[in-house]
Amino acid sequence: MLARLIAGTETPKAKTLAGHLANWAAALALAGITQARQREVVAKVKRILDAAGVLQSKTISAEQARSVFTKWDAEKRRWSAQTKAHYLKALNQFLRHASLPAIRITLPVIRANKTYQRGALTIEQASALVTTTSSSPATFRGLSGHRRALLYRLILTTGIRRKEAMALTPAHLKQSRLTLLAGETKNRRQAEIDLGPALSTELATLTGPLFPGTWGDRSAVMVRRDAAAAGVTTSHRLDLHSLRHTFITWCAAKFRIEITQKLARHSTSVLTLDFYTHAKNDDINAAAGALEDELNRCAFRCATQSEKGHGENTPPLKTRRKTTKKMRPIGVEPITYGSEDRCSIQKSQVKI
């Protein structure tokens, strides 16, 4: 056979996708990839190949891959666009290792997915949720009503994520500030989160894990039960991540977008504006009305000044004294949480 191969009279047999998958798993181990990561990506690719029925074939087409994702969308448990993107990325990494053409397809996005249903609570709704939960005698998977209320307050005032809150202990709390290690955050970077004085004092009195129990994988059920007890009803999905949406929406209404982005710990302001801030129709209509009123006031001032400028007692142009007006800041009002004030600068006109 070797002689025939050298002479070019016989071509080697092409491996099946199952054979390529075994070689890829061995290559991942030699590359220093952790065993958990190896099992994860190999299982993703094998699941796609099994669903498409091409394990013993020599290649997989774009139509076969698309049919797999469409089949998963039709199942009772719908897959998010992010999850399908991870599966497709693992499949293309495997195909590049096997020297096969990569698959370029547009993944179907289900608009009814939970990602597109989250919104923000109002101040009244959030206050009712925290107050009612704090006096609740019920315990949800090891988390008492008092600690659930502290968890809601923490997310509403800092925007901390669910998995980050699950790992909190008294060691993370240092002088009214939470210090998260690099391995405990989503972007794998150390984060320092400032707390309000009242919340930091209450958290400092707790011992052991700040939020113990097995509530993490059923947190949406926990929030919905507490919201129902508080009489809070919304048209969007309500879970702990919705409270993070609420925090970012409140920040966007009070601060500049670059400040809101830093508080949310987002990589870009596009993510902050497009996905995490929610404007209500009443706010939009009020903003449009405010702009119209401002335009009308400006037009009225211009008309009044024009009438005064053409009066009989108006001095000639050459005898008018030229003056320039300069705006000088007098004082700055600090931002107070829970009030309607904004950070403003009072100005006075000084003739020079």
Image (cartoon, helix red, strand yellow):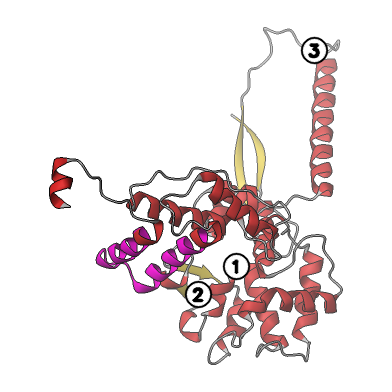
The answer to whether 72 appears left or right of 19 in the picture is right
Give amino acid for label 2.
Leu
State which quarter of the image contains the C terminus: top right
Given residues 18 and 168, the one toward you in this image is: 18
Q: Earlier in the sequence, mark 2 or mark 3?
A: 2
Q: Nearer the viewer, residue 107 or 12?
A: 12
Q: Is residue 188 visible?
A: no
Q: Is residue 167 magenta?
A: no
- Proximity of marks 2 and 3: CB atoms separated by less than 8 Å: no
User: What predominant SS class does the magenta segment belong to?
Assistant: helix
Q: Number of callouts in the render?
A: 3
Q: For the residue marked with disc 1, what is the amino acid?
A: Thr
Residue for badge 3:
314
Q: Which residue is mark 1?
A: 158
Residue 204 lies, in percent from the top left, at 55, 86
Q: Amino acid at mark 3?
A: Thr
| Left or right of 184 in this view: 277 | right
Residue 327 visible from this viewpoint: yes
Q: Compare marks 1 and 2 and give the one earlier in the sequence.
A: 1
Q: Residue 346: x and y, percent?
A: 67, 46
Inter-mark Cα distance, 1 to 3:
59 Å
Seen at 86% across and 10% down, the residue is 312
Look at the numbered disc 3 and give the secondary structure of its residue. Answer: loop
Q: Which residue is mark 2?
A: 178
Determine which quarter of the picture holds residue 40: bottom left
Whether tag 1 and tag 2 are in contact, CB under 8 A, the answer is yes
- Residue drawn at (75%, 63%) of the image: 237
Where in the figure is residue 198, as x and y percent of width and height? Answer: 63, 79
User: Looking at the image, which residue is at 39% across and 53% down?
Assistant: 93
Q: Is disc 1 placed on a helix, strand or loop?
A: helix
Region of the chain picked out in magenta, as a range: 20-48
